[in-house]
Image: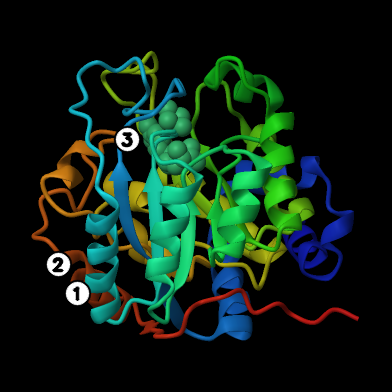
Amino acid sequence: MFEGVLKKILNHPEKVDLEEIAFLLSDSRVDEKLFALADEVRQKYMGKDVYLRGIIEFSNYCRNDCLYCGIRASNRNVKRYRMKADEIIHRARVIYQMGVKTIVLQSGEDLFYDEESIAYVIKEIKKMKVAVTLSIGERTYEEYRYWKESGADRYLMRHETADEQIYEKMHPGDSLQNRIEHLRKLKQLGYEIGAGSMVGLPGQNDYSLAKDVLFVYELDADMVGIGPFIPHPNTPLSNFKGGDLQKTLKLIALTRLFLPDSNIPATTALGTIHPSGRQLALKCGANVIMPNFTPSPYRAQYVLYPGKICIFEKDTACGECTKQLIKSAGYFVSNSLGYRKKIATE
Ligand code: SAM
Ligand code: FES
């Protein structure tokens, strides 16, 4: 019976409903077939190439208080830091010299960096032949526009969960509707947009996860980052259980079937809950890895969740390490800029 649903996703994804996706998520007999099919679809549309995105976590200041996040404003145990513009640009140059062609600039929601300072960093980095991705949270439409004009290519803004009630619980004073509006604005402005979610948030069930799959499909997200929720001790969710490996892999695989040409990372959080988490994700439809290039001492202070891998790696070691990881999983390291290659639809 599940084979019929898998076929329907491939041929008529627009006709698949929540019930059918939740059923696939709930039944472990589906797993082997689902994972093999996701890898087949991925190889059909993008071969064995894996894109590298070098990430610089340039500030851990955050004005928000997301219940799950280790750098939330209320966590007084965080040693806060901000990198200077020239430090960020210098770091981007190091990444570029290592052959990594996308620079991801990530931070908490930190208004210290105004429109001009972010634009300056983008313009300087764009002098190299790289794509620039911003992952700095919700800002104004004018800022998004200005940064696009300054050369930014992509914007990561996970929707975190497509379940409205859970979204509101996790983000005091915010709504899913607002998040969706930001994602739509970014898309209208011509960014490649990255949505995505956590697996295992308190209150989630297979229906909530099914909503995540349909959400990114309907949004036609260019990138989808999916990782397990990992409870952080200094947050209100410290006593909750984290997300599990198998469910996260299933969500990645289903997302690949719905969005054959989107870029899906094998996330650091997956590598944190299981030593082979990222390799397994590559075999289930993921095609991107984001090596950490945040310089020390900052890297150890950007702790979204405990046990985060790569914190104690030396300087640029994650670049080489992830290349090895890709090869050992049987895939190739791509040296392209890694834009989404949209499949033509008639
Ligand atoms: N501030 C920006 C934003 O909110 O889009 C970018 C940085 S934010 C810290 C990056 C991502 O980390 C979030 O989108 C969230 O999904 C993930 N994250 C935060 N806390 C986490 C946790 N405890 N477990 C797993 N992932 C977490
Ligand atoms: Fe910083 Fe959520 S706590 S964006």
What residue would you read off at disc 1? 320
The image quadrant of residue 191 is: bottom right
What SS does tag 1 mark? helix
Q: How many marks?
A: 3
Is there a contact, CB below 8 Å, between mark 2 and mark 3?
Answer: no
Q: Amino acid at mark 1?
A: Glu
What SS does tag 2 mark? helix
Residue at x 61%, y 35% (from the top left corner): 161
- Disc 3 within 8 angstroms of ligand 1 (CB): yes
What residue would you read off at disc 2? 317
Residue at x 54%, y 73% (from the top left corner): 39
**Residue 45 picture location, percent across and down:** 63, 82
Q: Is residue 148 above or below residue 185?
A: below
**Residue 224 picture location, percent across and down:** 57, 55
Sequence-first disc among 1 and 3: 3
Residue at x 19%, y 74% (from the top left corner): 320
Tell me: 73 left or right of 43: left
What SS does tag 3 mark? loop
The quadrant where ligand 1 appears is: top left
Sequence-first disc among 2 and 3: 3
**Residue 343 picture location, percent across and down:** 74, 80
Residue 304 is marked as 3
Mark 1 → mark 2, Cα distance in angstroms:
6 Å
Q: Amino acid at mark 3?
A: Leu
The image quadrant of residue 8 is: bottom right
**Residue 28 picture location, percent across and down:** 55, 48
Q: Amino acid at mark 2?
A: Ala
